[in-house]
Amino acid sequence: MKIDTKEARQEVLKDIIRELHQGGKLEDQKKRFAELLKDVSPTEISEMEQNLIEEGLPEDEIKRLCDVHVQVFKESLEGQPLPAAIPGHPLHTLTAENRALEKILEELKGLLDRLSAAEGGAGLESLRSDLRSTLDRLAAVEKHYLRKENQLFPLLETRGVGGPSKVMWAIHDDIRAMLRDFRGLLDTEKASELIAVGRRLAEMMSDMIYKEEKILLPMSLETLNDEDWARVKKGEEEIGYAWVTPGTEWKPTVKAAELPPLPELHRPAASLPLDTGGLTPEQVNLLLKNLPADVTFVDETDTVRYYSAGAERIFPRSPAVIGRKVQNCHPPDSVHMVKRILEAFRAGRRDVAEFWIQLEGRFIQIRYFAVRDGEGHYKGCLEVSQDVTAIRELRGEQRLLDWK
């Protein structure tokens, strides 16, 4: 029996996955899929996962059996070629990076095979430098994942496709954790454990390439329009690229400066137009008051225009300083230093001045930053003072919430 309607196909797909999540046999569901559905598109798989999440199936559960899903649909997916894209298009760049990543993964697997055949710690010692070098190049995948997470996924969400992106993001984090584990093992003599983690890492990264190119990218090309891809292109240039330099043949049909705001990003009438997003004056005030640092802004005429009135300021300020020349707000024995900093900032010779002091048992960092507009014109000076006593004492990592 052939099932033609989209709604009916979705119900069959969801039922197959539900059966798997309840412990059904993979081969039985693959057979059922082959009998009822001739093929399935990447978009249909994404829609199915999205619908299951909306119906209450936890994202973690979908992530747990994500590889099983791919096995069910693999034969159908294999028959679908990767959509073509012009060099410079974000999709083309992502696939070019995948080809570079595959080469590095092959190098890693070759080194692990050599390590497996070696005897004891001497083998690991002889390969440690090569393994570390390969891992360093492999770690550049972070830019690849960041572009997906910060550019591609948000645009898909605006088109109603959010669940699958969250699942893929979670797998990114698993890969990141395994990269850290592998790096940590490189400094030990645990060769067998290093081999096991390295091989699992290579497998996970290869699987991610498959999921990208057989599901995410074809679905993205079908879902996003030219304006969306122009947004992706604009943002990815800020994040950077892994291993490749994008081509220049593809040109967005809409210039970045002419892109209208997305519907959900329309700013309220009372908001201030900022480079990224928009905040109301109340939100700006609350944000600055709650920064974990004291900030003071002096404009290009050396006039104090603002200081943050946080609950626990490091150095006292009063409203009387607003409108005064900053030189008049410092004692005579330090005003020469203030003048020197501002002169260097104004002349463009320096952009940062930094100090640190001990104050009543606390370690205080004080930094001054030159503020310039997009054309490099001096617009003032930002002073940032922060109590970094606790920060200096941090060791190791804390990745879990420690609330009591």
Image: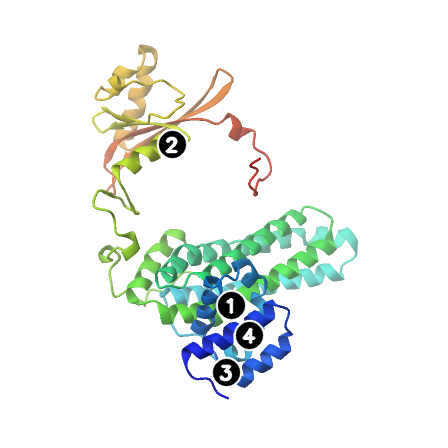
Residue type at mark 1 is Lys
Residue type at mark 2 is Asn
In the image, what residue occupies the spot 53% across and 73% down? Answer: 15
Residue beneath label 3, please? 37
Residue beneath label 1, please? 211
Q: Nearer the viewer, mark 1 or mark 3?
A: 3
Residue beneath label 4, please? 16
The answer to whether marks 4 and 2 mark residues whose Cβ atoms lie closer than 8 Å is: no
Mark 3 vs mark 4, CA separation in Å: 11 Å
- 295 to the left or right of 17: left
Mark 1 vs mark 4, CA separation in Å: 19 Å
Mark 2 vs mark 1, CA separation in Å: 41 Å
Depth check, front residue: 83 or 116? 83
Mark 4 vs mark 2, CA separation in Å: 50 Å
Question: Residue 184 at x, y = what percent?
Answer: 64, 47
In the image, what residue occupies the spot 28% across and 36% down? Answer: 282
Q: Secondary structure at mark 3?
A: loop
Q: Residues within 10 Å of mark 3 (few under 14, many from 20)?
A: some
Mark 1 vs mark 3, CA separation in Å: 20 Å
Can residue 81 be seen in the rendering of this structure?
Answer: no
Question: Residue 264 at x, y = what percent?
Answer: 30, 54
Q: Residues within 10 Å of mark 4 (few under 14, many from 20)?
A: many
Q: Which mark is residue 290?
A: 2
Mark 2 vs mark 1: which is more N-terminal? 1
